[in-house]
Image (cartoon, rainbow, N blue to C red):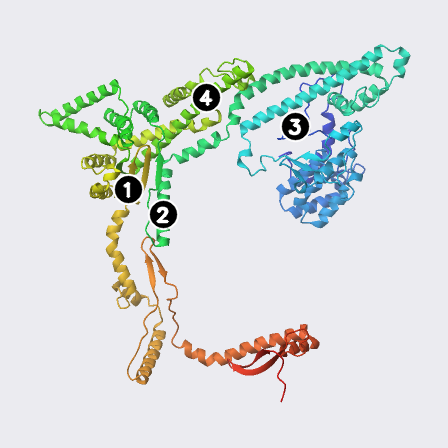
Amino acid sequence: RLFPFNNSLFQILQLLGKTTAEKAESVRNDHGGTIKKPQLNNKQRPNQNGCRKHSTTPLTPPAKKKLKLLNSKDSPGTETGKHGGGTESLFFEKVRKALRSSEAFDNFLRCIVVFNEEIISRTELVQLMVPFLGKFPELFTWFKNFLGYKEMSLLEMYPKERATEGMAMEIDYASCKRLGSSYRALPKSYQLPKCTGRTNICKEVLNDTWVSFPSWSEDSTFVSSKKTQYEEHMYRCEDERFELDVVLETNLATIRVLESVQKRLSRMSAEEQAKFRLDNTLGGFSEIIHRKAIQRIYGDKAPDIIDGLKKNPGISVPIVLKRLKLKEEEWREAQRGFNKIWRDQHEKYYLKSLDHQGINFKQNDGKVLRSKTLLNEIEGIFDERQEQTADENGMPPAGPHLTLTYADSPIYEDAAALIIHHVKRQSGINKEDKYKIKQIVHHFIPDMLFSQRGVLSDAEEEEQDEIDMDIDEDASKKHNGLPGGVNTSAAKSKLLFSTSPRLRSCEDAYNLFYVNNNWYIFLRLHQILCSRLLQLYSQTEQQNEEEVKEREWEKEVLGLKRDKGDNTAVQLRLKEPVDIEVEDYYSAFLEMVRNLLDGNMEPSHYEDSLREMFTIHAYIAFTMDKLIQNIVRQLQHIVSDEVCTQVTELYLSESNLSATGGSLQTQSSRAPAESLYQRRAEQLMADENCYKVKMGRGVITLSTYFGRSMFTKRLTAQPRWSDYIMRYLSTDVTSPELKDHLSQKPVFLPRNLRRIRKCQYRRESLKELKDGGKIETDGMKMECMFKLNLYKMVYVFKSEDYMYRRTALQRAHQSHERVSTRLHQRFYSWTQRWVSEHVTRDMLAATSHWLMGEGSEGLVPCSTTCNPETLHFQRIHKYRVKYGPPDKPQ
């Protein structure tokens, strides 16, 4: 809120009366006062297109056009005299009652206060009052009359500068002629402000037609044009620099002009100095620049100072010049202090201002990496295909639901190194599980993708030897001293994943693996990790190539030798120099990720370092620690969860039976074994989603054939579904539950039921006697189809039956004549009433002649005959037209 208003009207009006006095007291106009910071004009801020908006401040203070709410001539003894005139008080009371809300009334008064302080013009005040008083024309008209607002005489109501500003506010730039997206042409009716300093060449080359009309970021619907908070900081620093430069240059230009005047005065005699006078330009070439410089320092006393400079320059010029030089030194010192602040802000926000995707990416990527999101994605694809198949009544489309691509095999080792680095530092995972995770990452995934295996370090092999020794000791204790070497080797063999060397050399080979939710999520996250590492690796290579080419070009063409770390942003001190070479960016990035996972690096410092290296492409690595943590969490489930362990063991056992893939040429021979593997996997994962993972060289395809426990539900629901269809189609079978329910709560009243049965029995007896004892019943024509996937019943087109009461047709035949006659009379009376009101006799006669073919001038010759008939108990006329000359009577 601008002002803390109370509900009392007296306090509000009293506050409005004090604004002028408080504003006058707040300005220090004495010559001895100093201004700590230059007063910057907000109207000089540049717009987004870089165009400067020149201020239209008048040369002299504008005439004060305040809304006088206090009447000083009234007697202070009366309550009306304290609050203002009686009409004004009554107006405010009416507005308060009309708005019905104290908050709306406070906003109404705030608008008046803003106008009273000369922040907005009279036209702008009237526009602001439209939401408040637009629904109350009498109050709005009284307010405009009291304000002195006349819509058609804007130029007469305002001074020249203020009138021009008001006219500019009235222009609808959206409907003006366009030049690109940022400029509009002024209408021809717009009166341009006068400029006395223009020459003929100025009139030829300067623009008086096109004005800047920027698309502000908050009004734009184009997403990429919206500024971030860091860009706003950069723009604000630029605005402040520009405003301070304008102040300093204006002051310096005035100093130069007055110094030249002082030199002229020094060469004059006393009599010549007494006769010497200055014009409006004060010895320069502009009336505005020097007036603004003096007005910025002397405030409201500036007109007196300027008048003294004109009339008595010999005395005034040295005093004013001394004051301007003092301000010049003071502001230059302030500029040096501001430069340090601006430099720090530029270094802090420069790289962040270039990154438009990093802010939203961190929020959105956290949702994308969630397990629920990844599961919903593939389940949504599966459901969409099922609905499409059900609508088309055909077979489901072939092909996988998802396809993941691994583009570069060396990236697997970097991804595995980051994952193992984080696994080693997890105290909640025991040594055996850690070794299993290492084998999955270093051996199993590369084998499935037909890539080179990772090498386990010597320390990891020693850890496995310790695990084997522990297993041997435990087995010896359990079996009362019996050797357990066989069990140990068997346990160790289950941890080793192997792929046939023959398949590694085969180009069309594939691996088949049926997995559950945890395995699916791990594969998805692992592919995301590898793809992001590959993007950063490719970006490093690209930046290195570009820098090498740029250095070679500068050396050959310009003859310059630039160091590797020098660039334009560093030379302008927009960012700090980076000690890392460009070709080492990727390895440095991997080291930073390790430090971030260990807690040795702050996330903010990590992001800033990535921006310095990869600029706008660094945002994909901001959530790298969260991604690796999610992968390790899924790996921990894979090696410890019972179902996940059974899935892995099933794969290892089926791989010995050649049911887990091979060459595409021999796939038909393995079809029975793969089908058996699929059925076993479905039974094992009856309570989860079952995913068919098919891995090739750098490609993983994922297919979901059964939803959550759908396989089990189909087996158990099939008998119940058949029984339901049979009961629905049968007309004689009624379940005992339905009979009990109908006996307790019958649908019809007993008396109506007895009456209907008597009527039915009587009609059936009469029909049987009439037909000779033979009763023929027409079969039902209605047909319907069931969609088993969606449990929907759809009726076949043009096979519907309808039901009606047996007495309905008889009553319809009896009342048909009466109903038809009533409706005909109603329509006939309406037409006659309409004809009597809208059709004259001549029009009726002309229509009759035209209908009967009489007086057919300009028409095809024809003859019309009228044939009266009876239709639906009403007498109608049917007209028949025969074209050709009429038959002559014989």
Count of marks, rendered view = 4
Q: Do the residues labelled 1 and 3 touch (CB within 8 Å)?
A: no
Q: Name the residue under label 3.
A: 45
* Residue 416 figure quarter: top left
Query: Disc 2 vs disc 1: which is toward the camera?
Result: 2
- Identify the secondary structure beneath mark 4: helix
Say which amino acid is labelled 2: Arg
Image height of 457 relative to 720, above or below: above
Camera-nearest residue between 418 and 156: 418
Query: Disc 3 vs disc 4: which is toward the camera?
Result: 4
Q: Quadrant of the C terminus?
A: bottom right
Instruction: From the top left corner, tell me how far across and down residue 543 is, in percent.
Output: 46, 22
Name which residue lies at 25% across and 20% down. Answer: 460
Instruction: From the top left corner, tell me how far across and down residue 854 is, in percent.
Output: 66, 79
Q: Distance between the residues labelled 1 and 3?
A: 62 Å
Seen in the image, is 819 located left or right of residue 177? left
- The mark found on residue 385 in the picture is 2
Say which amino acid is labelled 1: Glu
Check disc 3: other Cα within 10 Å, few if <14, some if 14-19, many if 20+.
many
Q: Which of marks 1 and 3 is nearer the N terminus?
A: 3
Say which amino acid is labelled 4: Glu
Q: Mark 4 points at which residue?
A: 545
Check disc 4: other Cα within 10 Å, few if <14, some if 14-19, many if 20+.
few
Q: Which of marks 2 and 3 is nearer the N terminus?
A: 3
- Identify the secondary structure beneath mark 3: loop
Instruction: From the top left corner, tell me how far across and down residue 390 is, in percent.
Output: 35, 53
Q: Name the residue under label 1.
A: 688
One can see residue 726 in this view? yes
- The mark found on residue 138 in the picture is none
* Residue 649 figure quarter: top left
Camera-nearest residue between 845 and 418: 845
Instruction: From the top left corner, tell me how far across and down residue 572 is, in percent.
Output: 56, 18
